[in-house]
Amino acid sequence: MHALSTLDDFELMTLLKADNELAFGEVFKRFDSLLFIYAYKKLQNTEEAQDIVQEVFVQLWNNRKDFVLKTTLPGYLYKSVLNKILNSIARKQSETRYISSLQQAIDTDASSADFLIREKNIAELIEREIAALPPKMREVFELRKNQYLSNKEIAGQLGISEQTVETHIKRALKILRTRLGLLVYLYYIL
């Protein structure tokens, strides 16, 4: 048998298909460093370049039985490395987009949660201040704000004049504005 180093690529592939590990070793010896340099130039990362070249050789060994060389062996190996590099880059870009999207969702949820907490705290504060209004004034105010009744409807329901209803609402708003401040007042009214 000839020394493996003197065989051409086609002869090496024939031996490789016959499960000859020495032939695989010769292919590895011929192309490993060249493929690594090629991958490194594209990726600028030693570990990634080594991993990709290793994946190509593992794939070559695992598919040796069904392997059909349609081009030259170097052409096949370089193309395999390039495809794996492109897949790696696409995967990284996809991961980056996903992480960015996830971070944006987290940021949005955090600000939404913060807003909801503040809104709840303000609503509780407003409800406490409404509860502290004089009883008749509070009753008139709650009928207006919670049940959306008109002055006439409130007057009819409580047996008081429309003018009295209007006075209670004006006084309630003045008290709330004083106690809660203009921003909270506007928040509740709007």
Image (tube, rainbow, N blue to C red):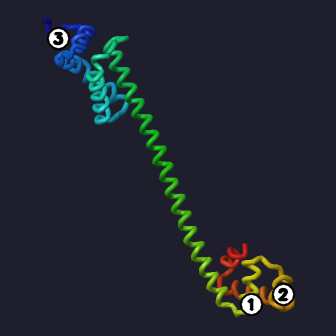
Mark 3 or mark 1, whichever is nearer to me: 1
Residue located beneath label 2 in the image: 155
Q: Earlier in the sequence, mark 3 or mark 1?
A: 3
Q: Earlier in the sequence, mark 1 or mark 2?
A: 1
Q: Is residue 108 above or below residue 48?
A: below
Residue found at x 53% / y 60%: 109
> In terms of depth relative to the viewer, which is nearer, 137 or 107?
137
Near mark 2 (Cα within 10 A), the count class, few <14, some 14-19 or many ≥20, is some
The quadrant of the image that shows the N terminus is top left
Label 2 vs label 3: CA separation?
107 Å
Residue found at x 18% / y 8%: 6
Q: Quadrant of residue 83?
A: top left
Label 1 vs label 2: CA separation?
12 Å
**SS under mark 3:** helix
> In terms of depth relative to the viewer, which is nearer, 76 or 153?
153
Identify the mark at residue 93; answer none if there is no mark. none
Mark 2 or mark 3, whichever is nearer to me: 2
Q: Amino acid at mark 1?
A: Met
x, y percentage for residue 120? Answer: 58, 74
**SS under mark 1:** helix
Q: Is residue 25 left or right of residue 94?
A: left
x, y percentage for residue 46? Answer: 29, 34
